[in-house]
Image (tube, rainbow, N blue to C red):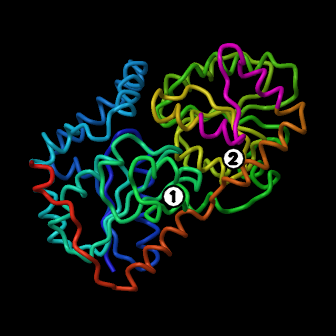
Amino acid sequence: MKALVFSITAGQGHNQTAKVVSDYLNETGVECKYMDVFEYINPLLSESVSKIYLMSTKNIPKIYGGGYRMCEKRDSNMPHVLPKLTNTLLARRLLKLVRREKPDVIICTHVFAALLVTYLAGHIDVNTYTIGIVTDFTIHPYWEDTCLDYYITASELLTYQGKKKGIPEEKFKPFGIPIDPKFAISRSKTEACRMLGIPEKNTVLVMSGSMGYGNIMDEILALDRLDLDFQIAMICGNNKKLKSQIDKLKLRKNIYNYGYVNNVDVFMDAADCMVTKPGGLTTSEALAKGVPMIMSNPVPGQEDRNVEFLLNTGAAIKISKTFPIDDALYYLFVSDERRMVLERSIQSLRKPDSTKVLAEFITALLEKGEKRKKRVLSLEHYEQ
């Protein structure tokens, strides 16, 4: 059995999901290759897309969010410029790879990769399954322009949203966003604190995302002013400047400040709650661990939709100018009832075995080996 996992570098979540799926499938006996399809087609294209995404989300987030909302409002019959103008050039080289590798299944963790695979649908082996993984708690704009066999979503509650976009209900598999299996491991707070070498007491985990976005300094100072007894574990990611700034702070509370770490699962086990940017992958990891979340600094667009989903399901708290971080944390530490509501909602949404369930589904598909009808979409569909 053979699989290809396609991603595109626009933020780290898509690539992390692709790597997790690829590694797990390889461990379970499915020969799997993972790649950034833009990098394969043209390294300069991949680098440009990544830089544009980072620049727009960090420096001009309101413009990025406005563009996302315009895509949401787009009439579904309106032609999409990406397939029309670029897929003719991009997908043909990708087709050579697919024909050479002859995969049994192609898995896409980014909608642009899914669009390319849709474009190739009439030209790849009829027995090759195609699967899209939606890596946020919303169905992104343009997933309705794809034609894949299955769509993996974060929750059953997203199925209706997908149906409204014209995707058949039976194609949705709400297994959860695939996360590293280590987030399914349960350990006590005592053990986690011992592993981290920090005291066992009330702990607030603050995560700034892989690139250290947001008003983290203001949040740390606000937490330090709160007259409750707790310690702070801060993960700055790749933001060395932020780490240096926090290291220089004179605070009343103990703060354990880290840069990039590879044991976030242990930090979550040690935490009583976490303050985080609401990316789809981080949010899924936190839900799997059952950690109450205080959401801050969402990237306008898909992360706004993550916030809406989690607030509407009662699974998180969001800070704002009129409801700052110290107020939110006070709610969690003082109100047992509020915390219990959060924990019940988290239990209903958490999917710690998402990657395992997806791998079992794929293996079962491939073991059937059934012939299927030829897909209706083809190159000609987009070239008209």
Instruction: Find residue 268 and name its label.
Output: 2
Does the CB distance between marks 2 and 1 fall below 8 Å?
no
Q: How many discs mark residues in the rendered view? A: 2
Q: Is residue 384 above or below residue 213?
A: below
Q: Is residue 335 above or below residue 96?
A: above
The residue carrying mark 1 is 178
* Residue at the (39%, 86%) spot, across then down: 368
Q: Which residues are magenta?
A: 308-331
- Is 173 left or right of 221, judged from the image as shown? left
- Residue 180: where, in percent of width, then height? 54, 58
**Viewer-closest of 231 and 339:** 339
Whether 310 is among the magenta residues is: yes
* Residue at the (48%, 28%) spot, across then down: 299
- Residue 379: where, in percent of width, then height? 12, 57
Q: Earlier in the sequence, mark 2 or mark 1?
A: 1
Instruction: Find residue 269 and name its label.
Output: none
Q: Which of the 4 image quadrants contains residue 356? A: bottom right
For the residue labelled by badge 1, is the local secondary structure a helix, a strand or a loop? loop
Q: Residues within 10 Å of mark 1 (few under 14, many from 20)?
A: many
Q: Is residue 263 above or below residue 124?
A: above
Whether 171 is among the magenta residues is: no
* Residue at the (80%, 56%) spot, across then down: 188
**Viewer-closest of 269 and 253:** 269
Q: Quadrant of the N terminus?
A: bottom left
- Residue 13: where, in percent of width, then height? 45, 45
Amino acid tagged 1: Pro
Q: Residues within 10 Å of mark 2 (few under 14, many from 20)?
A: many
- Is 118 left or right of 66, judged from the image as shown? left
Which marked residue is nearer to the observer: mark 2 or mark 1? Answer: 1
What is the CA distance from the residue labelled 2 to the residue labelled 1? Answer: 18 Å
- Residue 362: where, in percent of width, then height? 43, 73
